[in-house]
Amino acid sequence: MTGGAGDYQLRLYARYLNVRHQRHLLRLWPSPKAPMWTYQLDDEAQPIERPDRTGTETLQVTMTADQLDTLRLEVEQMALLETWSGDIDDIVEDCRQITDATEPLTATSDDVTVALTVRQWKVVLAVLEQRGPEVPKQDRARCIRQTHKVIDTQIRHRLPPGRVLGI
């Protein structure tokens, strides 16, 4: 292959013919310097768009201080795990925003009202769904399930369909 140092564009096409056979085509060509952009491909090998974080509609959920702590801990843990694995689901920024939004809330009473955007609630629910079965301690797993149920009961009917994690 001829060429040299510099910036190149890269496109990988993958086609799964069946369980044992795959085809790949890798294309490279010179390109001007461009910012790095990581994205995920859908089943048809087309880029999945970056999430729209411009929505400002907020929904409020009332929960106990312990449930708020569970929410924070699991979102922070997921941000660490996703950062380590490459953040292919593009949720680390959402996790950071959720942590920032819930940080000022204190456990001064039994119940706390948490206001997050629609996307942030979808991320919280997805994180709790994924983390619940992964946690080895039964008490912790029960707290995660209870927190998920409280949120789900109060706002699930107001969330648009679609997933935020590719699981």
Image (cartoon, rainbow, N blue to C red):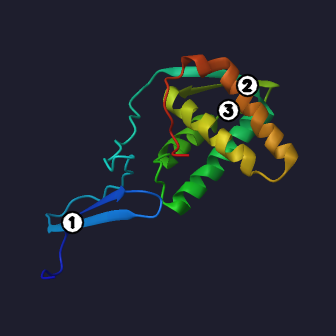
Dot 2 or dot 3: first in sequence order is 3
Q: Amino acid at mark 2?
A: Val
Near-viewer residue (55 or 130): 130
The Cα atoms of the two marked residues, 1 and 2, are separated by 48 Å
- SS at circle 3: loop
Position of residue 84 measured from the top left corner of the image (x, y, whole percent): 55, 62
The structure residue drawn at horizontal position 62% and vertical position 34%, both measured from the top left corner, is 125
Dot 3 or dot 1: first in sequence order is 1
From the viewer's perspective, is 36 left or right of 53? left
The structure residue drawn at horizontal position 55% and vertical position 17%, both measured from the top left corner, is 158
Q: Amino acid at mark 1?
A: Arg
From the viewer's perspective, is 143 left or right of 44? right
The structure residue drawn at horizontal position 47% and vertical position 21%, both measured from the top left corner, is 57
Near-viewer residue (103 or 83): 83
* Residue that carries the numbered disc 2 in the rendered image: 150
The reply to whether discs 1 and 2 touch (Cβ–Cβ < 8 Å) is no
Mark 3 Cα within 10 Å, few/some/many (few <14, many 20+)? few
Q: Nearer the viewer, mark 1 or mark 2?
A: 1
* Residue that carries the numbered disc 1 in the rendered image: 27
Label placed on residue 105: 3
The structure residue drawn at horizontal position 37% and vertical position 50%, both measured from the top left corner, is 41
From the viewer's perspective, is 38 left or right of 85? left
